[in-house]
Image (spheres, rainbow, N blue to C red):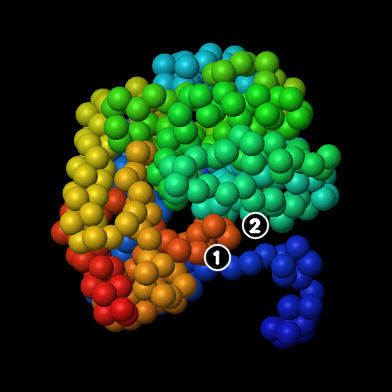
Amino acid sequence: MTLRSDSQEATDVSDRARDLKRSTIRVLFDAADKNPDAIRLEVGEPSFTTPAHIIEAAADAAASGFTRYGPNGGLTSLRELLVEKIRSVNGFTPSIEQVVVTPGAMNGLYSIYAALLNPGDEVLLPTPGFPNMDETVRLLGGKPVFYGLDKSDDYLPDPEEIASLVSPRTKVLFLNTPSNPTGTVIPPDRIEAILSVTAAQGVWVISDEVYDQLILDDDLPYLSPGSVDESLPVISVYSFSKVYSMTGWRVGYLVAPPPLADILRKLQEPQVSCTSTISQKAAEAALTGPREPIEAMRSAYVANRDFAWTRLTDLGLSGYRTQGTFYMLIEVSESGLAPIEFSLRLLEEHSVAVAPGEVFGPAGKTVVRISLANDKEKIGHGIEAIAKFISELN
Ligand SMILES: Cc1ncc(COP(=O)(O)O)c(C=O)c1O
């Protein structure tokens, strides 16, 4: 057997693998990893460890034999609990067959695109928006078409713009509420107006609600698109990652109309067989266990958001006051630098890592994203460094 050289491997890989772009955020991660003193505000995951009762439930499950393959679409015991969660949190009641458990929302999204897209089909994606979506769509032969989220309109999707972008090839509209990275929660009337457009045009809606229980303002009305009219072609995607601080456990779930749910279950087999049974038992404990640790994490994000917003406005910076998630967008156009250059130099000169806006698509060219899942002191230091760096550059 001969070992292949790097250059041979480069020519052997598929076009699709070769064309996959490396996320701009990796450039920043790599640079931040080299600086052990850096304050890491670029990360997209909770700072808390998973609550203890969830970890204990996983250990118990492993000890009592939950160490084997499970059903493709998830354990029945978990799916029963999820039906109840969707009823009480998201306002609709799917049948148990409509609920498919996936190894993280990311795998659920991948399977949904794999189930729906033929080569050349178009997917409407928000920008600034969740970065992984356009590469996933491209990987599966689809074509991303961006709709803009404008700060002057609270980063909300505009139904008229969406209608104007629909073409005969449009298959899917991706919606994300609360939104990463903008932190916006889409108000009910917008959701309804958008669903009127997609229903009239026969376009599927993927509703990514992985931050559904991280709404930071109690009085903010929240409408799950899946609850509006259960006959509409809407697929809802949820996760344990963010709400329960369970990013590494890899448990997500989706709700789809029954025939599509069958296909999505089937698609698990050649990809992953099933979601880890130990993680699914942990997820059950997350749903049935005490709410206090979960509420305490949300309260910490609320306090950090309030703190960050006051600091930011006191320092004369402009940003968007997060309504949901644990991110905050900050304008850096006054620096005269593109966000990626701004971020790399901020890291080098002030040891603060932030996510550059380019990561979030074409409309991210004036912003950086910070994470509110960190100590107040570090968040404050990060915001002060951004303000100082902008003034140094002027
Ligand atoms: C909007 C959005 N959707 C999906 C995901 C993926 O979540 P999971 O960890 O469940 O794969 C993320 C993670 O950052 C996200 O921000």
Q: Can residue 77 be spotted in the picture?
A: no
Which label's residue is closer to the chain start, 2 or 1? 1
Q: Can residue 142 be spotted in the picture?
A: yes
Which residue: 48% across, 24% down?
188
- Where is residue 233 drawn, in percent x and y? 69, 25
Residue type, mark 1 in image: Ser
Q: Is 144 on the left-hand or right-hand side of 342?
A: right
Task: Quickly name the residue at label 2.
Answer: 135
Task: Quickly name the residue at label 1.
Answer: 23
- Where is residue 87 drawn, in percent x and y? 47, 16
- Where is residue 281 drawn, in percent x and y? 43, 31
Pointer 2 and pointer 1: residues touching (CB < 8 Å)?
yes
Residue type, mark 2 in image: Glu
In which quarter of the view is residue 208 placed?
A: top right
Query: Alpha-carbon neighbours of circle 1 within 10 Å: few (<14), some, or many (≥20)?
Result: some
Q: Is mark 2 within 8 Å of ligand 1?
A: no
Q: Judging from the image, what secondary structure is the residue with disc 2 in? A: helix
In which quarter of the view is residue 169 placed?
A: top right
- Where is residue 211 drawn, in percent x and y? 42, 37
Q: Nearer the viewer, residue 49 or 150?
A: 150
